[in-house]
C-alpha cells in the first residue's frame, strides 16, 4: 500500500487519528489491499515482428456525429480532416473499435453512483469499473492496454511497473484471474510509475492512437493524471486532432471526453506541437505525450 500511496497521519482529536492516502488522481482514500499472491516473472521473449498491412478507416461524413457502437462509427472527424492510417492488429486499430455503451449513458463511479459532473464525457466505454476504488486515471490507461493484449491472446505480455519500481507481469490464467491481477496492479501503480514505463514522444505532431498524455505528481501537486489517445485525425493544413479517453477520481467508467470548447470539432481535441493539451478536467503541460514500447515494462528505467 505504501508503494501506491503517500501517507499522512492527521490527529483530529486526542482520541481520533486519521490516515490519508493520496491516490494517483487525487483521491484521498486508500485503495483496498489486493487479494492473492502477485507473481512477477521475467519478461517473455517477444515474437518476431511482422510488418502488418495498413488499415484505412472507412469514410464518415465530416461534421456529422454518427450513432454507432465504436469510436470509429460514432465520432465523425472534424470538418475537412481524415483519420490517420493504423496497422491491422495494432493498439490504435483496437482502440478505434472498442465497444461503447448506448448514446446518453451516464458515467458512474465504482459504487454505482453518478459522477459529478456529467457534462465532460461524450461516450462511455463498455468495460467494467469494478466495485472497489481502484480504476482511476493511470489505471484506465493500463486497463485499455491490458485488454488489447488479452484480445490478441497475449495476456502474458501484460507487464506494468509499480510505484516502488518493481515489475508485475501476468503469469497466466483465464480472464477472471487476469482481471483480478489487474486490480493488484492498480493498487500499486500510479501516474509516476506509468510515466517511467512509457517512452516520450519527442514530436507531438507524430501522435498516434494508443499514445498517452501523462503527468506525475510534481511541482507541489499531490497527484497527476493520464489519458489515452483513442484516435487521431489530421486536417489538410496539418492540424492534428485527438479523441481522448480517461477515468478519474474516484474510480469511474472509462469515458471519451467531450470538447465543449470547440463543439464543431465533434469532441476531438486540438493537438499542440509542444506536447501539451487541454481537457475538461486537466491541462497537460508541454512534453506530456508518451507511448508504449514493445517491451511492455519499458527499459528498466
Image: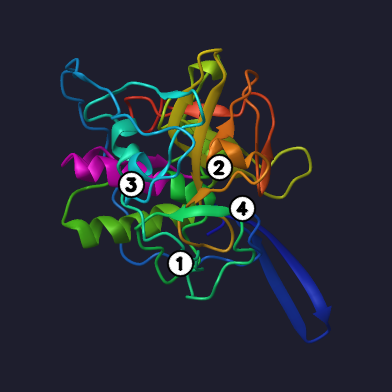
Q: Nearer the viewer, residue 174 or 60?
A: 60
Q: Nearer the viewer, residue 18 or 59?
A: 59
Looking at this rendering, what residue extends furthest in the right direction?
A: 13
Q: CA distance from mark 1 to mark 3?
A: 34 Å
For residue 70, the mark is: 3
| Label 1 packing within 10 angstroms: few (<14), some (14-19), many (20+) | few
Marks 4/2: CA–CA distance: 8 Å
Mark 4 closeness class: few <14, some 14–19, many ≥20 residues within 10 Å: many
| CB atoms of marks 1 and 3 within 8 Å | no
Residue under label 1, please give it: 33
Q: Residue at x 28, y 23 (%)?
A: 56
Q: Reading the chain from its start, which is encountered first: label 2 or label 3? A: 3
Q: CA distance from mark 2 to mark 3?
A: 22 Å
As displayed, is residue 188 above or below residue 82? below
Residue 25 image label? 4
Residue ID at (50%, 66%): 133
At label 3, counting other C-alpha atoms closer than 10 Å, the crowd grade (few under 14, some 14-19, many 20 or more) is many
Asked if one can make out residue 167 in the rendered structure from this viewpoint, the answer is no
Q: Which residues are magenta?
A: 142-162
Return the residue at label 2. Answer: 226
Cβ atoms under marks 4 and 2 closer than 8 Å: no
Along the line of sight, which residue is nearer the eye, 106 or 128?
106
Amino acid at each position: 500500500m505504501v508503494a501506491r500511496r503517500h501517507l499522512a497521519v492527521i490527529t483530529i482529536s486526542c482520541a481520533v487519528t486519521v490516515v490519508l492516502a493520496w491516490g494517483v488522481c487525487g483521491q484521498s482514500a486508500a485503495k483496498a489491499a489486493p487479494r492473492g499472491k502477485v507473481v512477477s516473472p521475467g519478461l517473455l521473449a517477444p515474437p518476431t515482428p511482422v510488418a502488418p498491412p495498413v488499415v484505412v478507416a472507412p469514410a464518415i461524413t465530416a461534421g456529422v456525429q454518427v450513432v454507432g457502437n465504436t469510436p470509429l462509427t460514432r465520432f465523425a472527424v472534424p470538418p475537412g480532416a481524415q483519420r490517420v492510417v493504423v496497422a491491422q492488429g495494432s493498439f490504435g486499430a483496437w482502440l478505434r473499435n472498442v465497444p461503447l455503451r448506448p448514446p446518453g449513458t451516464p458515467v458512474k463511479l465504482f459504487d454505482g453512483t453518478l459522477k459529478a459532473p456529467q457534462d465532460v464525457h461524450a461516450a462511455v466505454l463498455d468495460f467494467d469499473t469494478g466495485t472497489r476504488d481502484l480504476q482511476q486515471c493511470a489505471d484506465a490507461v493500463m486497463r485499455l492496454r491490458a485488454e488489447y493484449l488479452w484480445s490478441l491472446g497475449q495476456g502474458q505480455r501484460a507487464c506494468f511497473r509499480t510505484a516502488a519500481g518493481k515489475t508485475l507481469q501476468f503469469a497466466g490464467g483465464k480472464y477472471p484471474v487476469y482481471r483480478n491481477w489487474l486490480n493488484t496492479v492498480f493498487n500499486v501503480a500510479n501516474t509516476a510509475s506509468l510515466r517511467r514505463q512509457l517512452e516520450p514522444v519527442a514530436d507531438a505532431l507524430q501522435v498516434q492512437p494508443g499514445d498517452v498524455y501523462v503527468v506525475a505528481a510534481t511541482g507541489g501537486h499531490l497527484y497527476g493524471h493520464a489519458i489515452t489517445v483513442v484516435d487521431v485525425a489530421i486536417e489538410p493544413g496539418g492540424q492534428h486532432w485527438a479523441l481522448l479517453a480517461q477515468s478519474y477520481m474516484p474510480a469511474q467508467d472509462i469515458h471519451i471526453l467531450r470538447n465543449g470548447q470547440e463543439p464543431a470539432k465533434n469532441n476531438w481535441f486540438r493537438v499542440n506541437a509542444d506536447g501539451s493539451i487541454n481537457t475538461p478536467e486537466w491541462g497537460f503541460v508541454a512534453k506530456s505525450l508518451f507511448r508504449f514500447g514493445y517491451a511492455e515494462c519499458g527499459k528498466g528505467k
